[in-house]
Image (tube, rainbow, N blue to C red):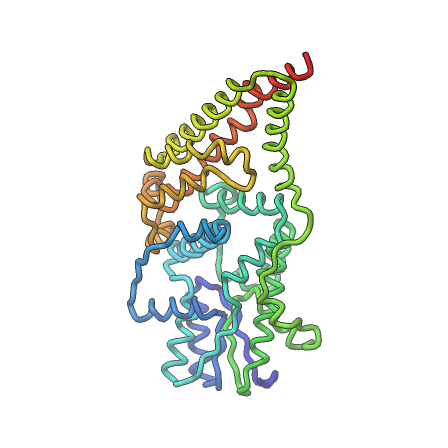
Amino acid sequence: MKRECLKIIGTAHVSQESVDEVKDAIYEQHPDVVAIELDRGRYTKLKEQMMGIERDEEISVTRIIKENKVALFFTSTLLSYFQSKIGADLDVAPGSEMIGAIEASEDLGIPIALIDRDVNVTLQRALNKMGFIEKAKFLFSLIASVFGFGDEEDIDVEELKNPDNLDELMDIFKDEAPSVHEVLVHERDAYLAGSIMRIPQDHVIAVVGAGHKPGIEKYLDNPETLPNLRDLEVINDKKGIPWVKIFLAMIPILFVVIFFLAFFSGINITWNIYDFIVISMIMGFVGSILSGSKIQSAIVGGAVAPLTIIHPLLAAGWFSGLCEAKFRKVKQSDIKNLAHIESFKDLWNNSIFRILLVVIGTNLGVSIATLVILPSKVFIPLFMKIFGM
């Protein structure tokens, strides 16, 4: 690729003007290659969309939970929801400018280069880099936006392509979630720039999101600053001291210590153990059933509650959620339908929402038992008996 022969088109992903700009540039300049901001998976989905192929395949919630990819799936689903929602509001399907680039390229027989990193790698790297507080803030912002909280000003999508507006938007994003900003923006700027530099042909048109254009151009002008692209594809586990996990582990350890101290002090703890088991099971069951689960899921959530309280890395909600997933099959259409939800009734009929609600409800019930009921009814009284208070 020759730098002087490269044209980078910064687009808004849900903009008809961007679609027209991309197609006009390709038809007028007839480049050697059209590089598009897609990975193989997203490219395949867009091609199927172009051919009118609609797949409503079942999503294995069981596999997602077993492989510990719940956070990845949840984040990906919410981000897909936002893009689809904006596209529905503007009557422009997400990725239309990429479809326009593909159509024009195929019409002229021009090869296409896929220059983006796998979306799952990007999201997982972002999640691994985020701390607990940053994750909580990011999740709250996403959920608040889903339910319509916050500013409701009309968005001029074309204005978002203005460099001044982009700088302001990126600064806000950087302040709210610096780790996410680093992975979604800076890392991808580098990855996209590196992928463009690898293209052997001379004349290239690159179609990318407007927010990436300044960063890509900076790397292209200073190639010595470009990191190794292989390093940007590695998913490393987050390093550092897992304070949250340590804190959560201390709670059941404290409970077990109190039981042992009471036992070795000669105090009869039989009824205390019964209370622990019964209260845990009842709260797991109640939390699940109040969240709208099937009776079978509530029974499972209640049955495993005592064990999950003792084991800090287990959550009763995952078990009730797995059971609920057996009755509520999640399909691709459930994700697509999120963009068209206009009432709580629509949300209630969505399988993704219902399973997540069961998970949250069960965990909430067990958390109330762990942090409120059990200490006051079981452990504090035992503690007082141990020390003769």
- In front here: 355 or 159? 355
Q: Quadrant of the C terminus?
A: top right
Q: Is residue 179 left or right of residue 43?
A: right
When asked about the image quadrant of residue 300, the answer is top left
- Residue nearer the viewer, 27 or 344: 344
Q: Is residue 59 above or below residue 53?
A: above
- Is 218 drawn above or below residue 162 in the view shown? below
Q: From the image, which quarter does the N terminus lie in?
A: bottom right
Q: Nearer the viewer, residue 259 or 353?
A: 259
**Apparent side of residue 309 relative to residue 346 in the rendered image (left or right):** right
Residue at position x 48%, y 45% from top? 145
Number of numbered discs on residues: 0
Examine the rendered structure and indicate whether residue 12 appears above or below residue 25.
Answer: above
Residue 209 picture location, percent across and down: 52, 66
Residue 58's spot in the image, x, y percent? 33, 55
Quadrant in which residue 287 is drawn: top left
Q: Which residue is most to the top?
A: 389
> In the image, 376: left or right of 45?
right
**Residue found at x 32% / y 36%:** 294
Q: Position of residue 217 (x, y in %)?
A: 62, 73
Looking at the image, which residue is at 43% across and 70% down? 98
